[in-house]
Amino acid sequence: MRDLGLLKARLSEYGALWLASFLFVLAWTAIASLALGQDLIDVADKVLPISFIVLGLAVIVGLGVSVAARASLGAKSLVTVLALLLILPLLWSPVLAVLIVAAIARVAIEYSQAYAQFRIIVSQLIYPVVALLVEGPLVAVVWNAFQVVASIVGFIASALQVWRVVKPMMARAASEALSDDD
């Protein structure tokens, strides 16, 4: 039971972290570039590295807490494997936020060094896996698939996190509405 609690807690924290990172970077980037008129490329080059560092530290802290938790080795190993599998979708959240602002502002974000470096690193991580599975230069296809999968994973994790908060409020409101009818 404790093992399941550890897994649920870490997945919940992941969802909250993905959503918080996305919303914070979206707001910061939109305010700085759209409202204050700063160059979006400069804003992205400042915000993305900071976001990556903060998210990386959060994952390390989460893993440290998980290792120190009173749970089985299997549960700790599962949490570690999930953290490694979900790190790229987690790091995608601030990039997605910047891409949304870039689309709104109609700015080519490819000129951002932070964005370009992120794409290069992800491609370097993905390409060997793709090369093992299929032949041919499919990095662009895999990059697009990564974007879609990372966005879906983040959306689902965020939606579940929001649902955990909203569900008790809805139950409480329904209970109060039923008691008012009596």
Image (cartoon, rainbow, N blue to C red):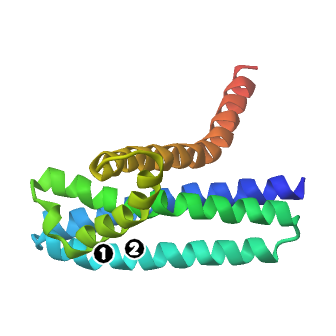
Percent of width and height locating residue 162: 56, 46
Looking at this rendering, what residue extends furthest in the top direction? 182
- Give the residue at mark 1: 47
Residue 11 in sight here: yes
Report crowding for label 2: few under 14, some 14 to 19, many 20 or more residues within 10 A (C-alpha): some
Q: What residue type is labelled 2?
A: Ser
Percent of width and height locating residue 122: 38, 64
Which residue is at the front of the view, 141 or 43? 141
For the image, the number of numbered tags is 2
Q: Residue at point 69% right, 37% down?
A: 172
Residue 171 lies left or right of residue 28; in this view the side is right
Secondary structure under tag 2 reads helix
- Give the residue at mark 2: 51
- Please say if 48 is above or below 110: below
Percent of width and height locating residue 29: 25, 66
CA distance for labels 2 and 1 = 6 Å
Instruction: Write down the quadrant of residue 95 in the picture.
Output: bottom left
Instruction: Write down the quadrant of residue 67 in the picture.
Output: bottom right
Report crowding for label 1: few under 14, some 14 to 19, many 20 or more residues within 10 A (C-alpha): some
Q: Residue at point 83% right, 61% down?
A: 74
Residue 49 lies left or right of residue 80; in this view the side is left
Secondary structure under tag 1 reads helix
